Image (cartoon, helix red, strand yellow):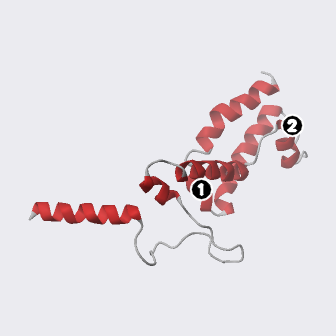
Amino acid sequence: MSLRNKRTLCTMCIRPVMIYASPVFAHAAPTALQDLHVIQNKFCRRATGIQWYVKNSVLHRDLELPTPSKYTKDASERFFSIAINHPNPLISAAASYEAPPANHFLRRPRNAPLGSPDDLTAKVEELNKAFENLME
């Protein structure tokens, strides 16, 4: 099989399995993504038959493949930009996220809401109250 076909096999068959649900990985620790990086490196080395002393960065550059962490970050940005522009206001409100300042030590948003609930939470609470009234 030619190198071009092997690269296509990687991008069309193997990467979607590895990067499934990549928007969830947007806030994952770099060590969690390291396993995906190792798997992709092993596949690329076997597919190309390259020697052990060739750097992974050279391998990725020659195959024109982004690293799994870069691919995951790009996929997450695309997903959230599409979700924010969704016509359903509940989906766009759930997808809106303002990142903390760069010098902030938190990597993820806190689970405890501060202030008034968002539109989605308000609708769910409204439906719960209506269901409780119906059951009485």
Q: Position of residue 60 (x, y in %)?
A: 82, 43
Q: Secondary structure at mark 2?
A: loop
How would you rate the neighbour count of disc 1 (Cα within 10 Å): few for under 14, some for 14-19, many for 20 or more?
some
The answer to which quarter of the image holds residue 66 is top right
Check residue 50 in the rendering and tell me which mark sits there, or answer none.
2
Q: Is residue 25 above or below residue 62?
A: below
Q: Position of residue 120 (x, y in %)?
A: 39, 61
Residue at 80% from the left image edge and 39% from the top image edge: 45
The answer to which quarter of the image holds residue 48 is top right
Left or right of 47 in this view: 82: left
- Quadrant holding the N terminus: top right
Check residue 37 in the rendering and tell me which mark sits there, or answer none.
none
Check residue 25 in the rendering and tell me which mark sits there, or answer none.
1
Residue type for callout 1: Phe
Which of the two discs, 1 and 2, sits closer to the camera? 1
Discs 1, 2 touching: Cβ within 8 Å = no
Q: Position of residue 26 (x, y in %)?
A: 61, 58
